[in-house]
Amino acid sequence: MIKNIVLAFFIVLLIGCGKKEGGLFMNPTPEKTGITFSNNLTETNDLNILDYLYFYNGGGVAIGDINGDDLPDIYLSGNQVKNKLYLNKGNLAFEDITDKAGVAGLSTWNTGAVMGDINGDGLLDIYVCAVVGINGFIGHNELFINNGDETFTESAAKYGLDFETFSSNAAFLDYDLDGDLDLYLLNHAVHTQKTFGKSDLRFERDDQTGDRLLRNDGQSFVDVSEEAGIYGGINGYGLGVAISDFNQDGFPDIYVGNDFHEDDYYYLNNGDGTFKESLKDYFGQTTRFSMGNDVTDINHDGWPDILSLDMLPEDETVLKSSEGDDDIQIQKLRIEQYGYHYQFTRNMLHINQQGGKFVETALLSGIAATDWSWSSLFADYNQDGEQDIFISNGIPKRPNDLDFINFASNDQIKMKIDNTKLVDQQALDMMPSGNIPNYVFEGSKNLRFIDRSKDWILRDTLISGATAMGDLDNDGDMDIVTNNINHTATLYINKTDKKANYLRVKLKSPGKNPFAIGAKIVSYHKGILQYKEMYTVRGFQSSSEPVIHFGYGKVTKVDSLRIIWPDRTTQLLKDLAVNQTLIIEPENKTPISYPLFTQRKNVIFKKVEGNLGIDFVHREDSYFDFNRQKLIPYQFSDRGPAMAIGDINNDGSQDIFFGGSKLVPSKIYTQYSEGFREKTIREIKKDSVKEDVEAVIVDFNGDGKNDLFIGSGGADFFDQMPPLSDSYYVQKDTTFISGQLPATFQNASVLASADFDSDGDIDLFVGNQMITNDFGKIPQSYLLENKNGAFEIVENQSLLNIGMVTDAIWDDYNGDGSLDLIIVGEWMSPVFFKNKDGKLELDDMDTALHKGLWQSIIPFDIDNDGDTDYLLGNWGLNSKFRASQKAPMKMYYADFDANGSTETIVTLEKNGENYPIEGLKGLSEQLVSLRKKFTAYKDFAGKPIEGILSKEELDKAKLFEVSELRSGYLENNDGNFKFAPFSVDLQVAPIMTFLKYDFDGDGKEEVLAAGNYFGVKPYHGRLGSFAGAMIKGKNDVILGADIGLDFSQKSIRHLNIINFNNHPYLIATFNNEKVQVYQLIKKIDK
Amino acid sequence: MMKKISILILLMVLGSCQKNEEPIIISPNLLHQSIDKVTDIMIHDIFSPPVASRIFAYPNIAAYEIIAANNGQYKSLAGQVTDLTPIPSPKSTTSVNPQLAALIAHMDMSRRLIFSEDKLNVFRDSLYTIWSLQNPTEFEASKEYGLSVAEHISAWMDKDNYKQTRTMPKFTVMSNEDSRWQPTPPSYMDGIEPHWSKIRPFVIDSSEQFKPVPPPVFSMDVDSPFYKELKEVYDISKEITAKGDSSDEIAMAKFWDCNPYVSVTYGHLMFATKKITPGAHWIGIAKIACKKTSSDFNKSIFVYTKTSMAIADAFISCWDEKYRSNLIRPETLINQYIDENWKPVLQTPPFPEYTSGHSVVSGAASTALTNIFGDDFSFEDDTETPYGLPVRKFSSFDKAADEAAISRMYGGIHYRAAVEVGVKQGRDLGKFVMEQLNMKQESQLATMQ
């Protein structure tokens, strides 16, 4: 009975959902609002996506109060239809005053539309961009100067802004702080990128496509692009522009998003009228097909963060039937030969590190894939104090559909191109449509966003492009307008109303910038900082109401509001009531000094110039694992170099051994009082063919002189090829000779030395990671017993095939006084071997559930309770991999096509099904039979693994799983270990290594964690966002930026402390990079 | 109930046919049609030129072996072609129509080799329906035989290392050698089939047997032979593009483009214009020759078989050299050193430059066709008309091959050495293949002589 009632209720609810309302936003109909503007596109034989690559980019939208009635009005621009101006009459009723106002526009093809007070008379003018000079498009960018009586006068020529270029958008900024508004004009290239062309094409200015910076000289605007250092090349596909003071020095900076292979531009304002484009110095990677973008501070540190949009689909079917990222070799070519930066096809969220490098977290944040996306707007839509995101998207036809690319037949296209230069309707019909629902995400405190698209808004099937915000119904919350293709514009009316508290701020400034564009506001409530800048041109081809909006949830009082005017003055307002609109004019201003925010720096590490003479640069050999084993999830050839510290020349001071990659000799540095010097030991150097991945310096034979053991790897040599065997060099007199070693041929990953059998000599655990050309087969790892300086393998079956080992430590975890062995690895859980009288026995610990891609382990009492916990480095959460206990990441390993070589296929869970990460192209490069099974991409796309491989094929495969990707620690509870993840700050990249030491000289040990890894295909991007961190305790983690470390965009392999002249130094050894040496400042002070 | 009635009717129809079964006649045109069909599917499925040559050869051999086993005129290739053993005999010879069996074997082999089986099945099934109505006894017996031969040939084919080469390493692009091939615009595709030299050849002893002289030593010194050849490509291209699209050189280049996948990129819009491969073009010429000489079914399959084996071996030989010398394409060097904006007339295909594949294959195929039809054989080549290209006339196969070779220079995708050495490599190989193959019975040879 109860069930029936519940059911009935549920049905009522469902029916209820039929109405035109989402949980947070409602969409009033055009009939009600009077906004009937629809950007209707008509494809013709003369004009379609083949003639004009941005045929589907849509129009613009600007929101602002043009008649001073405090009701924001809406201007919408159209591509082939006339522009419209709607006057807000209150109660969400609008009146079309276009004709009276004279703002319909004369250009053939309008794009971005923005409002700004160009002439500084306190009235919002309208600037409309146009594409002119191709496809018969005529006209020019139009400037409608507000006459103050709901009419406008087109004055672009008068102001020198009547450009006849390929404009996308324009942004207002006062870059020279002279008090008036200058303009950044965003133009887009149209040349069909047949070749990459060198990146330095951007230095040659092209009048049609190059962006421009226009200085407001009072009566007219002057093009200062060249002198200001603005690129204007033929390859600048500018689609997104954002203005913000990214480095908080008081001068507005510019971020430009470029489509296709051209890099985005990050212009830092030098403060002298010029800019320095600095993208590569601050960003590890950017969006590839950059579209719109937006800037706000999402993590309450007062530094603006950037969201740049791309076009990665979330839906499996679309994802697998769309053209994906570049091949890894092509990517390398594009970067190394043509000079471009790392770009990947997905949204990127760049978190500002106090003006330093940005940390990219879109995958971790859950906002990486929103399909063909145009505009993103940050705002606190639900007014809970955290920034939310609205993303508009959609494309009428998906031209990157793989079936279209590969199978559109010649008849349909080829002839047309040769003869009349157009795609006919039949060819257009072959492209699937991309009518996808817009996205809205709820922000949270930990960089994560929750997808609210299904409950905050109604699921639409529109092509929404330009998007702007404003409080259309004057109820305090932020409403949204989208300009849609072939559909009336959508109003998203926010229903938060008074359910959560807010503050709206309008600024009024005397002089030529009445709306105080460039002003900043810092709000404080209960110790929480919120930071906003007054820039109206945001998202894509649009501008929003010049209002700053803060949400406060249930908090009713704002402790203070600091206004920072563009002229470097400030005023402070205290104890403000919420739920009001403040109109603030300059008053009691005091000068402000930059930097605005004192950096939280407590420098512990200081880089040593000259590296103490350690000039080792590791160079990886150019070997692509993916060329040979095309389906492996990541590489193995890049796990070096080896690094070991010990006294090699018997002078009592510590020396260093660095391993070389394949065919590159290793290097030894010996210590002198003035620094380190390279020392050649021919017997060791001659074995340069091997790739040295791990090394230990220990006196194995007890003769008082250190010996050297090197673990070889590299994943290139195979079978029983001699370079795959490990090396053991015994020091004799003044030279080294080869020591006795059982012949093994594996790719080594770790050497852990200890006297496990308590016989007085040092034994060695050799952990191995994988078998070349046969990833998935478990390699053999060995315990080597030291017998008078020679090694013998200890028979131990459970240890032998323990897994794909990456790290191991000897530690007495059970407190019985003897050293036990703990091993971690990939596709396995941490494994404990207890040492029972010199015999290692597998201990059945309760960690079996935590199968990870573990990279590192270190003992550390993180919870400060007196026992030893174990910190574990894992893959992290900021990657394409996803795994949980409920939905593990899976890997199938078998010789699926029975051709004598094995394959691995990795799957990820999505909506209850497991899908291979690789698409048909990738899989069929290895499994050709799939091309016969799936003759079209649409047959393959959207199929889970069971629909791709037969049951027999899957049954014969060995199945691996990963259920935990987070780094964390095993908490010791009376000998039982429970996994606890680290905070999100430590999940931004794989953690590759740990080092325990009292770095800050407080008498207690801390653990330094570092990571990043790049051995993945371009689909995964670069896992390089981790700058390093010092772990002092469970809830006491200090990020690298705060202690003087920045290991981001470098893939670390080893952290070591070395004593030089009786002072400790930190040495960081990276893959394919130069070594870094740091002074421990606090230790020197002591 | 309905089903039963249908079966009854079907039985009646079949029964009625039984009474006046006529022998099924397989015209040579049906063979031509069948090969055309497979060619169309290959274009759709996008097979690279070397792979396409393999798809032509095996079905022809299957069909040919049936003809040879059942016709005194032709001699089996078993023992002549690497590792091929005699095909099985039919269960009963009485009702087998060898030509029908040959065509069925041909279609079945083709089906195994292409991807889009459905497209071929439609063609096959309509023929099957006609034949089964025409003469079910003969059809069933021939089908059983044809399929058993296909099975036999397929088992042999499966040992040619094709499967193994699928999973061999991709070509590694990055290196410090300036002369090394790099992916080319616009789609920068990986080097295709870097292990094709490991495919088992049909007639030649090894992929290295016709190893050409090395290309001119790479040098950017303006006086070096290599640079001169590079400059020649650039100068010719400038000269002929100035003359315009109607110039004979550009007409030649376009006619012999034979690129199965020319990718086109307009912003996010991408697609490919597809054409037949060089091998397919020469199979087309073989068809023209067969038709002009009114060759019967048996002669036609003989022509196709001989030609397609020469072509297939030519690709193995050529690809062996391509990934030995790994030479960089003119487009990469010209863009880098001479003219950043230069584009070749043809899109540069995705594999190393030396030697020119079309030259080698044209040399081999023309030698095979000359061997069969004689040197003095003029023809009108309309092979490319479905792809919007005109008809070209040639006075001999050799002349056509010469033009195909030099067209690659006009197309801006090859240096002179690759063309000249390539066509010689192909002819030497073709000659060897002709000398090795003994496909006519002695008596026939005697009468021919």
Image (tube, helix red, strand yellow):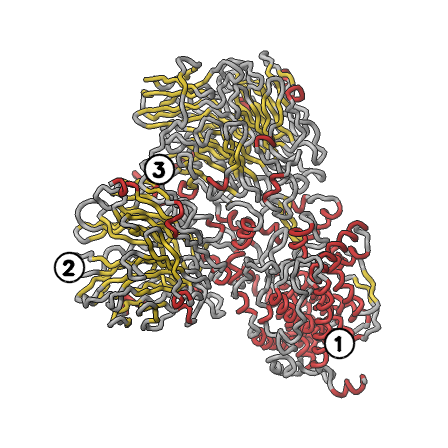
Q: Compute the Cα span from label 2 to label 1.
A: 88 Å
Please provide percent x and percent y for residue A900: 47, 70
Please provide percent x and percent y for residue A149: 59, 11
Q: Three-letter amino acid code at disc 1?
A: Lys
Callout 2 secondary element: loop
Give the residue number, with chain letter if any, for mark 3: A446
Residue B7 bears which disc, if any? Answer: none
Give the residue number, with chain letter if any, for mark 1: B299
Crowding near the residue tagged with mark 3, few <14, some 14–19, many ≥20 C-alpha atoms within 10 Å: few
Placement of B226 over or under A981, stated as above or below: below
Crowding near the residue tagged with mark 1, few <14, some 14–19, many ≥20 C-alpha atoms within 10 Å: some
Q: Are marks 2 and 3 in contact (CB under 8 Å)?
A: no
Report the chain holding disc 1. B
Give the residue number, with chain letter if any, for mark 2: A816
Which residue sits at x=20%, y=57%?
A812
Count the marks: how many? 3
Q: Between tags 3 and 1, which lies in front? A: 3
Image quadrant where residue A723 sits: bottom left
Which residue sits at x=52%, y=45%?
A341
Q: Is residue A648 or residue A6 the one in the foreground?
A: A648
Q: Can residue A875 be seen here? A: no
Placement of A742 over or under A63, stated as above or below: below
| Side of A312 where A450 appears, left or right | left
Q: Three-letter amino acid code at disc 3?
A: Asn
Report the chain holding disc 2. A
